[in-house]
Image (cartoon, rainbow, N blue to C red):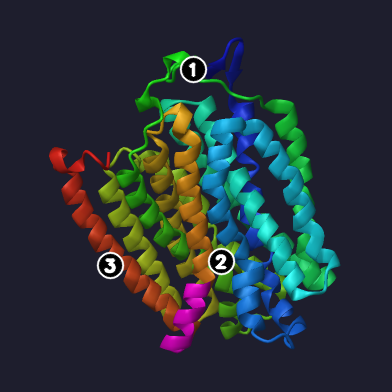
């Protein structure tokens, strides 16, 4: 356990409670995936409804999550992490459930903007609190566990989204956003506002410039890779229901089950990550992007539902390794008084990739002959990224050239 305030220590309970709100960010996309075909049918008379649903309802939250995450990090540094998290969770539940009572597509998109803003703040503040509460290898295990929890939570959430969609129609999954209020009770009961730990100065008078310094050159490089990694991660999640229609799957519950099975690879990857985290970042990225490439190309070439699900699990396994690699690489050197800004920048980059995923995949599908061909293209791009990561690995092995990356 790590001391963060006189007489107070953060332990497993605090770590678990701070991991659970990650499910709210996952919910932004996952629970709606099985009902995308239903929403498209319901709003078929709205001009451009395909883009409005894919890029508006489904992934619009990610755009505003990208915009709000850096701002949320700045606010957390300035006004406190916990109180900002509590406010965001309350607002998230209200705007999240609102579309269940709305029948106007543009109004629904407006509520989704609110969901994205509060998702960004929730994910950023919980990550910062984990960094504040824990240090060293313990911190990296908890940060990596965020990806595991997000992926494990996606399994029942996508299934529940399908079940609620089958039972209540396209509005059903929006009722699940009330989960935010349940998790809020745990945050109120089990967490507190952190103060600087031993690694940071304890008084304003002792604060020196390095305590605020962020190596933006290093962080911007990681954030650029993160945008691409998030596109790869979410392209399958946002398009799975449509991709499965190729194999005759039209029932939202069945689509939810198939997507859930495909995402099983992510928690497996995050479980494996702590065992391989000791290897150089460049080497990890090389292997991870290569695995993702194999999965996407296999998905695009699949001739049966079982083969498609199996290859999607391979791809998601690579993502389960990639995401904790990127986030631990980004947050490891951040000092206490700048942790919010640095973490917010990374979370914003990840959310930007989430937003772009649906648009990029739809754009590719329209130009290369369909969704399966788009998956092949993503696989090829991932393989190129693996080759670039191998070059990065060679650069990182040179101490003089790797200083800004370590």
Q: What's drawn in magenta, residue-wise?
A: 359-369
Give the side of residue 192 with respect to residue 264, left or right.
right
Between the C-alphas of marks 3 and 1, the distance is 47 Å
Q: Nearer the viewer, residue 113 or 378?
A: 113
- Label 3–label 1 contact, CB within 8 A: no
The answer to whether residue 185 is seen in the rendering is yes
Give the side of residue 4 with respect to residue 114, left or right.
left
Q: Earlier in the sequence, mark 3 or mark 2?
A: 2
Residue 40 rendering spot, x and y as whole percentages = 70, 81
Residue 65 placement: quadrant: bottom right
Q: Earlier in the sequence, mark 2 or mark 1?
A: 1
Q: Earlier in the sequence, mark 3 or mark 1?
A: 1
Name the residue: 62% across, 60% down: 61
Q: Nearer the viewer, residue 34 or 108?
A: 108
Give the side of residue 366 with respect to residue 254, left or right.
left
* Mark sitting on residue 237: 2
In front: label 3 or label 1: 1
363 in magenta: yes
Name the residue: 79% across, 65% down: 99
* Label 1, residues with CA under 10 Å away: few <14, some 14-19, many ≥20: few
Residue 123 rendering spot, x and y as whole percentages = 58, 45
Residue 180 rendering spot, x and y as whole percentages = 74, 46
> Label 3 belongs to which residue?
384
């Amino acid at each position: 356990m790590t001391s963060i305030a006189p007489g107070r220590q953060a332990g497993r309970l605090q770590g678990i409670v701070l991991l659970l709100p990650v499910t709210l960010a996952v919910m932004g996309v996952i629970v709606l995936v099985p009902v995308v075909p239903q929403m498209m049918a319901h709003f078929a008379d709205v001009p451009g409804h395909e883009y409005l649903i894919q890029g508006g309802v489904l992934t619009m939250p990610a755009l505003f999550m990208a915009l709000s995450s850096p701002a949320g990090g700045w606010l957390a540094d300035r006004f406190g992490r916990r109180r900002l998290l509590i406010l965001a969770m309350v607002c998230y539940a209200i705007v999240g459930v609102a579309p269940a009572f709305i029948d106007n597509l543009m109004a629904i998109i407006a509520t989704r903007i609110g969901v994205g803003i509060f998702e960004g703040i929730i994910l950023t503040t919980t990550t910062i609190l984990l960094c504040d509460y824990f240090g060293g290898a313990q911190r990296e295990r908890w940060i990596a566990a965020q990806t595991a929890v997000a992926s494990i939570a996606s399994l029942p959430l996508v299934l529940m989204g399908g079940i609620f969609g089958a039972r209540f129609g396209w509005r059903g999954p929006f009722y699940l956003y009330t989960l935010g209020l349940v998790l809020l009770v745990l945050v109120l009961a089990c967490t507190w506002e952190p103060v600087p730990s031993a690694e940071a100065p304890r008084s304003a008078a002792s604060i020196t410039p390095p305590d605020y310094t962020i190596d933006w050159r290093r962080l911007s490089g990681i954030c650029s890779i993160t945008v691409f990694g998030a596109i790869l991660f979410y392209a399958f999640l946002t398009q799975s229901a449509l991709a499965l229609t190729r194999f005759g799957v039209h029932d939202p519950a069945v689509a939810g089950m198939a997507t859930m099975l495909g995402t099983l690879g992510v928690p497996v990857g995050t479980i494996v990550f702590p065992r391989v985290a000791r290897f150089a970042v460049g080497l990890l990225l090389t292997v991870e992007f290569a695995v993702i490439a194999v999965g996407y190309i296999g998905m695009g070439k699949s001739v049966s539902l079982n083969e498609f699900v199996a290859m999607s699990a391979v791809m998601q396994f690579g993502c389960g390794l990639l995401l904790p690699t990127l986030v631990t690489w980004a947050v490891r050197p951040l000092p206490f008084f700048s942790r919010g800004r640095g973490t917010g920048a990374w979370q914003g980059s990840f959310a930007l990739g989430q937003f772009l995923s649906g648009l990029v995949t739809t754009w590719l599908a329209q130009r290369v002959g369909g969704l399966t061909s788009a998956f092949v293209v993503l696989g090829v791009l991932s393989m190129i990224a693996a080759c670039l990561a191998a070059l990065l690995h060679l650069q990182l092995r040179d101490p003089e050239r790797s200083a800004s990356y370590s």
